[in-house]
Image: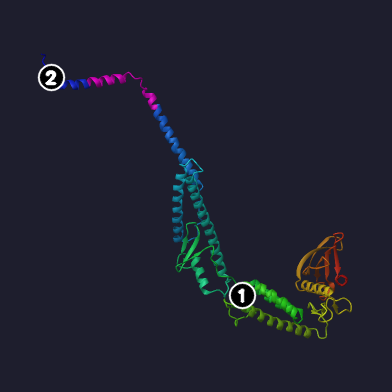
Amino acid sequence: MAKKQQANPASAVIGAYQTQNRARDFGANLKLLDASTQRAQAVTIKNEKEAKVAAKTAEINTWMSKLKSDLPLTGLDKQSQTAMKNWLFGKKQEYAYASSQIANIQDQTSPEYMMYSDQLNEINTAISNLSGQVKGYKKNKLEFADMNEKDMWSAGNDPASNAQAQTIYGLSDSPTPFTISQDGNLGFNIDGNNISFNDYDPPFMKDYKAAKYVTTEANTLFTSHTELSEQKINTIRLGLEQQLADPNSLKSIISNDFTVNGLDFSNIVYDPEDIAGTRKQVIDAIIVGYKDVAKEGVAEYKRKNPGARKENPNPGNVVKNADGTQTYTSPDKTGPLAGDVDSYTDNKQGDYAMRIDQSTDYAINNMKEVTETVKGPDGKDVKQTVKRGIGMPFEIKGIKFTPIYKAMEGKNLNKSLAEYTFVHPANGENVTFNYDQMMQFAKRA
């Protein structure tokens, strides 16, 4: 019986060594890349990665370049500038994040792409919105300071309104309490209440336009040397209601804005619950004053022209008759009626005569100096300054007439000197009627 051979522990190690060497030998037989080729491939891979990074960076930069990041901060106090810079910094971070995300999305129709695209547009819109409002705010601030220096703000303002404007425009020791919404709307925190810049109403100015209207009408009535008729009063009332339609105009007129100009309504108090009632009080008071002024004008004329018969610019009176017609009568029997006729008892003729008279009076009472070119004795153009008034256009039988009155040196104002221009309906030529021709045309109409 053969003797059993014992295992040699070293044989396993030797076998493993041999096996390992055989593996190495097998690998050595492979056709491996040489060192220069390996380096070239590594460089290619590196370059491809860097190109992708550069492309992605460029794509992100393209999005970032669309960011409207400018704000007009000059002229604002430091605290306001800091608040706006912080807001803008936050918007830039939001924009940068959205840009990096959208750059990784190839499908421009995907919901994710659309979401980030909307975010980018909203951020840009918010910044543009704030920029525009800051520019408007700075412009309003300069105007407010300028008007304040010129004392143009009406005394009819609520004192709290002026104090609020002082705070909002930063014209005090305290910084402007700016607030900025997510969508870039500018606001002001006043006593815990946020006031939007877009909705803010600054104090209103003195209404010089309305005041001039009231005083000019008074001067016209005085120089007309005619007492007021009911018809004229109704016309005046309509004009005053139009001028004082704005509550702020009403507040300005009844304040002491124009007391030195003779407009004293210190006995009238503005009632915000009954604006129409306040307006009526003011207009009634003005008309009472107008009546007195007109009477003074008549008295003045009589003192300076004893026994004189003047050309009356009053538009006359219209009386409706029982048969449906109306009678137009010139107050002093010398109005717009030609010849010895003192009145028309005819609906159309009375209406036409009144229109002619009213429009001509308007031209006479609203004359202005104008420069016109005429031919001199030598045939050359010569410029001369004259007083000329243009009346309110009126229509008769579909033809539009425009009264033109030119003041003649050395002659008194007289309606008979007026001219009426119109376009001839048959040949399209410009035609001029004198006063008598205009009246004859009105009679035949």
Q: The disc labelled 1 sits on which kind of residue?
A: Leu
> Residue 337 at x, y = what percent?
85, 76
In terms of secondary structure, what is the magenta stretch mainly?
A: helix
- In the rendered view, would you say 393 is above or below 270? above
Left or right position of 22 against 288: left
Left or right position of 213 against 2: right
The residue carrying mark 2 is 6
- In the rendered view, would you say 173 is above or below 71? below
On the question of residue 39 being in view, the answer is yes
Left or right position of 215 against 23: right
Classify the position of the C terminus by image quarter: bottom right
- Residue extending farthest to the top is 1
Decide whether residue 25 is among the magenta residues. Answer: yes
The span from disc 1 to disc 2 (Cα, nearest Å) is: 127 Å
Which portion, as a residue range, is magenta? 17-39
Residue 34, quarter of picture: top left
Q: Which mark is residue 250?
A: 1
**Nearer to us in this view, 128 or 308:** 128
How many other residues sit within 10 Å of disc 2, few (<14), some (14-19) or many (≥20)?
few
The residue shown at (44%, 56%) is 86
Decide whether residue 425 is among the magenta residues. Answer: no
Q: The disc labelled 2 sits on which kind of residue?
A: Gln
**Nearer to us in this view, 183 or 419:** 183
Left or right position of 233 against 133: right
The residue shown at (84%, 81%) is 333
Q: Which mark is residue 319?
A: none
